[in-house]
Image: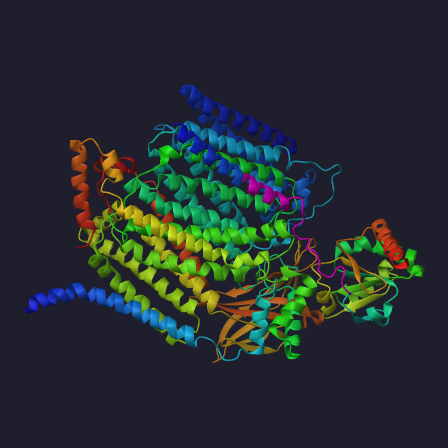
């Protein structure tokens, strides 16, 4: 298996090298045959990398302890499910998955453009292959996933305890990788359009569509990450403002900004330079994040252990930024677009505001994350920039963004009809005011909470109202009328749905970060405590010896204060042979309004006494649901729908920017 | 045309400058272990402690003035501590008569586990129990094993993160002894 | 003044009034909460939680002492409670941890020296962004009628394009509520 993997990796490197050269040369010398061969190489490359991953997967499942990676990340006792997950449990293996996903994206691009190709296609293909070459060099040299042991040990160490503690590990990293690596495609088309130097905007709709797909993956990936943190780490929270979490959020913020500002280009021919800068920026930030996570520069729960690939990532980051922004500056004269607004209160102006706020949030988070590095490099002082700092610096920006998301979708393009915009705003505004008053009357004494709930209501009602009114119009045409309306205004309605999801997320974050309750209490077996309307009784320790671990569970009987049982919470501590300290495993009663969350943090007197932390977290499930709605809206916007015949002549995005007509509603 | 060329040059220069600044900055972070944090205690008077010994009377750090003290934080559940235990024992045997004391401070452990380990591994130097971790907090402990070298005047001379190395430790102790003699 | 005209005026004015009223009510609510928001005297447990939230758990990667379930963090919370009982102020307690662990034990960078820059940089970022956007929008609004459309659009519309425009406009009227 090791040999198969090693040779397949070399073959993959050769293939992607060939693809990069053939695609670029074919375009330069105008030889379509060469480009076509490069396009087909993509499928061969994908198959090859699939073989590589398959080899590693088989080695892990069969516990082939001749391979160092298997020894370090699997063991005889590890269940097969978690053995398979070990593929991304450590740096070397996860790089294989990374390569597979990149090759998958290249194959997808090759498949998508098998017939009608934009002029930029060969260059984009070449850029994609070049990026793949970099990641394949990494696994062919600095990182050696298929390195063998000098002598074959009898058993392995098993995966890191945190990674074998929860099945969410099966989906969180792959989705995040799909989200990260996907930025290569928009980047490649952006670079290609700069290389080709055409004055046309044909790349815009291509990049928009791919960015949407990537945005959906990243949204889900971030969401799953938060869910993992909440369900596994046992601290009652889901976002710690950890450096690695922050750098994952940065490309999300930039791509969100792009998805808004791209409409300026599609509809008004504005902001071409800005949009392409955003695409390059998102990819650069993704590369920066990879460097921070894998270059062992920062310490974080998500960071990989010390690795030797740091300098390689840094060099790649330098190349990406030099080529990307260098080309941008080179082509600056051809990218300048004349811009004109009819009114400062219009959809266009709102998009400018949206971009400023999203970029300000990204800049603040980037500054905060890199700040300890800067300070230490300059003055040697070691500092921490943690949650409280980010929360206070970023909250105002996010509140302003909510204000915009609750008003801008009601603003018309171009000219302002203030009366009409205000008429559409009256219900959302009144709803927001009512929610704020109600929150204050309910005894909430936190300005951020009151503002957050009010603005979330504004966003929810404003965007929901637009969807409902669209449905009402469609209903005049019967059931098919609704479908037709939704399909016609698909992008508009999908966007509104994303905003509705955003409102739910905002409400969830506001509730959980400002209205949560918690207590820490030590209970003897049989003893109870009262917390948040519940009587919690410790039932005494139970021990369960499993093949790969020892599970100590500390069940807590939950009764409502007024009487009536409400089940049992079963927080645990898992002891893994590879870990010196037990890994906690919280137990959660999830509810519509709030969760009851218990984790056991220490045991005394052989478990006759246990220290628990209990949390009452409101709104957490709105966050998950809202995030899901956001991703759903993104999928709806990105879903390829074959245009019906009568729409064929409708101006496409490219033509639309040239013809000054208002078409559709977004 | 020439104006465009010049502007291009300036812009490209700006890009290159910014990128190289970023690279230089980030490369300072390379090759450093991010989990190693300097201790502000080095050079200061060691926080005093009075802790009960596993087998013996309570021990007070300030009563050891005039001797070099090696304060080692450890636990029976810590595998890295097991690897350095031989080196500590060797240091203890070697310097016991030259005015050097090795003290093991037991961290987040139970008396039973600690005694068991001390007996089976044959730990000869005194071991004290830091039951409420107050001493660990006073020493700014970030993990174990961590070892502090305290000179004859009671100042912390060095802090070693991770398992100690016998030769390095003995040469360092020799230096401290010499410096004190001068 | 006839009744129909007054009614029509009210129809146009009413939404404006409603929105203004909503904004006013929201602003007053926020102001009231801001003024009356602070609780008189936090309990000792709350004080411990507050101080612990500002300290970085030294053996964790990213959690505060308040959030971390690690035993050492638990000990730190106990230590904070003990020091509070002994009459130490929050600043003194923080200082004692900084003395042992260095500045990195604080969740937020100290306000002195270079690290103090962390406190005005976000404000500068927001200010520059908002001012830049405001200037840009002003310039774009004032720029002459020759928009991008007029620059690019030279040829008259073809027959099919014209048909498409008509269809699209019709659809627009159908979709947007009057």
The x and y percentages for residue B177 are 88, 57
The quarter of the displayed image where residue B51 is located = bottom right
Q: How is the image coloured?
A: rainbow
B104 left or right of C126 in image: right
Depth check: give the residue in front, C105 or C92. C92
The magenta stretch is: B19-45
The residue sitting at the left extreme is: C2
Q: Is residue A131 left or right of residue A156?
A: left
Q: Position of residue A263 (x, y in %)?
A: 32, 44
Residue C142 on image: x %, y %: 26, 47
Name the residue at 11% across, 64% down.
C8
Q: Nearer the viewer, residue B103 or A197?
A: A197
Residue at position x 39%, y 42% in the image: A274
Q: Residue reaching furthest right?
A: B97
Depth check: give the residue in front, A439 or A69. Answer: A439
Q: Is residue A93 visible?
A: yes
| Rendered view: A341 above or below C103 | above
Please state which of residues A336 and A641 is positioned toward the viewer in this rendering.
Answer: A336
Find residue B91 and report its image quarter. bottom right
- In the rendered image, residue A111 lying in the magenta stretch gets the answer no
Q: Position of residue B114 (x, y in %)?
A: 79, 64
Q: Residue at x 42, y 72 (%)?
A: C34
């Amino acid at each position: 298996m090791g040999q198969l993997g090693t040779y397949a990796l070399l073959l993959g490197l050769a293939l992607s090298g060939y693809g990069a050269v053939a695609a670029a040369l074919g375009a330069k010398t105008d030889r379509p045959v060469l480009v076509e061969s490069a396009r087909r190489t993509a499928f061969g490359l994908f198959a090859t990398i699939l073989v590589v991953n398959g080899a590693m997967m088989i080695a892990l499942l069969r516990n082939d302890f001749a391979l160092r990676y298997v020894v370090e990340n699997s063991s005889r006792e590890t269940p097969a499910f978690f053995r398979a997950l070990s593929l991304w449990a450590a740096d070397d293996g996860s790089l294989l998955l990374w390569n597979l996903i990149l090759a998958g994206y290249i194959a997808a691009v090759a498949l998508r453009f098998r017939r009608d190709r934009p002029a930029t296609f060969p260059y984009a293909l070449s850029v994609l292959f070049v990026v793949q070459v970099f990641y394949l060099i990494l696994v062919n040299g600095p990182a050696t996933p298929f390195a063998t042991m000098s002598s074959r040990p009898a058993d392995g160490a098993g995966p890191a305890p945190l990674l074998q503690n929860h099945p969410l590990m099966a989906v969180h990293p792959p989705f995040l990788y799909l989200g990260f690596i996907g930025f290569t495609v928009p980047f490649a088309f952006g670079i290609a359009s700069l290389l080709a130097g055409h004055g046309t905007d044909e790349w815009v709709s291509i990049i928009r569509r791919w960015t949407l797909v990537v945005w959906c993956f990243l949204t889900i990936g971030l969401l799953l990450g938060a869910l993992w943190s909440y369900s596994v780490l046992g601290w009652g929270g889901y976002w710690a403002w950890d450096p690695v979490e922050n750098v994952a959020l940065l490309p999300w913020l930039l791509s969100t900004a792009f998805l808004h500002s791209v409409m300026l280009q599609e509809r008004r021919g504005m902001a071409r330079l800005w949009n392409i800068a955003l695409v390059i920026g998102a990819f650069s930030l993704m590369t920066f994040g990879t460097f921070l996570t894998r270059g062992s520069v920062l310490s974080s729960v998500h960071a990989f252990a010390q690795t030797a690939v740091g300098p390689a990532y840094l060099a790649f980051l330098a190349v990406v930024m030099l080529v990307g922004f260098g080309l941008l500056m080179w082509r600056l004269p051809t990218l300048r677009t004349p811009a004109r607004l009819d009114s400062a209160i219009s959809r266009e102006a709102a998009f400018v505001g949206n971009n400023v706020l999203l970029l300000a949030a990204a800049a603040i988070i980037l500054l905060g994350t890199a700040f300890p590095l800067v300070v230490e490099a300059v003055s040697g002082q070691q500092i921490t920039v943690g949650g409280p700092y980010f929360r206070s610096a970023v909250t105002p920006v996010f509140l302003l963004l909510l204000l915009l998301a609750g008003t801008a979708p009601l603003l018309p393009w171009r000219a302002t009809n203030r009366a009409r915009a205000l008429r559409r705003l009256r219900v959302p505004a009144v709803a927001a005011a009512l929610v704020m008053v109600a929150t204050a009357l309910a005894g909430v004494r936190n300005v951020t909470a009151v503002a957050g709930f009010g603005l979330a209501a504004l966003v929810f009602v404003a965007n929901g109202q637009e969807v409902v009114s669209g449905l009402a119009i469609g209903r005049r045409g019967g059931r098919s009328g609704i479908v037709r309306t939704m399909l016609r205004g698909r992008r508009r309605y999908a966007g509104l749905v994303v905003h509705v999801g955003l409102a739910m997320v905002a409400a969830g974050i506001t509730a959980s970060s400002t209205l949560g309750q918690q207590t820490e209490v030590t209970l003897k077996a049989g003893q109870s405590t009262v917390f948040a309307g519940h009587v919690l009784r410790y039932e005494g320790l139970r021990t369960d010896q499993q093949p790969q671990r020892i599970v100590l569970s500390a069940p807590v009987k939950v009764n409502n204060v007024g009487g009536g049982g409400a089940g049992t919470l079963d927080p645990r501590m898992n002891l893994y042979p590879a870990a010196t300290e037990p890994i906690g495993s919280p137990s959660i009663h999830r509810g519509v309004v709030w969760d009851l969350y218990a984790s056991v943090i220490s045991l005394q007197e052989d478990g006759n006494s246990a220290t628990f932390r209990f949390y009452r977290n409101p709104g957490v499930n709105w966050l998950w649901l809202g995030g899901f709605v956001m991703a759903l809206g993104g999928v709806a916007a990105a879903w390829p729908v074959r245009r019906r015949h009568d729409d064929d002549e409708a101006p496409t995005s490219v033509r639309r920017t040239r013809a000054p007509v208002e078409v559709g509603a977004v | 045309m020439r104006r465009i060329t010049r502007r291009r040059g300036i812009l490209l220069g700006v890009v290159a400058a910014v990128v190289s600044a970023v690279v230089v900055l980030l490369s300072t972070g390379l090759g450093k272990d991010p989990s190693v944090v300097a201790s502000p205690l080095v050079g200061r008077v060691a926080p005093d402690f009075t802790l009960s010994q596993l087998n013996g009377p309570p021990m007070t750090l300030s009563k050891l003035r005039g001797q070099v003290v090696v304060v080692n934080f450890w636990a029976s559940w810590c595998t890295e501590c097991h690897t350095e235990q031989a080196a500590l024992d060797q240091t203890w045997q070697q310097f016991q008569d030259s005015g050097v004391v090795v003290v093991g401070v037991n961290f987040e452990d139970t008396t039973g586990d600690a005694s068991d380990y001390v007996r089976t591994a044959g730990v000869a130097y005194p071991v004290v129990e830091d039951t409420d971790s107050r001493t660990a907090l006073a020493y700014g402990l970030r993990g174990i094993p961590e070892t502090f070298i305290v000179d004859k005047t009671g100042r912390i001379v060095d802090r070693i993160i991770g398992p100690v190395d016998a030769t390095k430790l003995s040469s360092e102790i020799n230096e401290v002894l010499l410096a004190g003699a001068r | 003044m006839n009744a129909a005209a007054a009614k029509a005026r009210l129809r146009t004015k009413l939404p404006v009034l409603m929105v203004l009223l909503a904004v006013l009510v929201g602003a007053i609510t926020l102001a009231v909460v801001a003024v009356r928001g602070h609780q008189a005297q936090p309990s000792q447990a709350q004080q411990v939680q507050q101080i612990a939230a500002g300290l970085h758990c030294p053996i964790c990667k990213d959690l505060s002492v308040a959030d971390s379930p690690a035993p050492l963090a638990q000990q730190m919370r106990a230590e904070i409670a003990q020091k509070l009982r002994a009459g130490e102020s929050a600043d003194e307690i923080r200082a004692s941890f900084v003395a042992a662990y260095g500045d990195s034990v604080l969740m937020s960078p100290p306000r002195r020296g270079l690290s103090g820059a962390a406190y005005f940089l976000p404000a500068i970022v927001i200010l520059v962004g908002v001012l830049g956007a405001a200037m840009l929008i002003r310039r774009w609004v004032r720029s002459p009628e020759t928009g991008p459309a007029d620059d690019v659009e030279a040829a008259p519309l073809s027959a099919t394009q014209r048909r498409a425009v008509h269809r699209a406009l019709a659809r627009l009227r159908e979709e947007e509520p009057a």
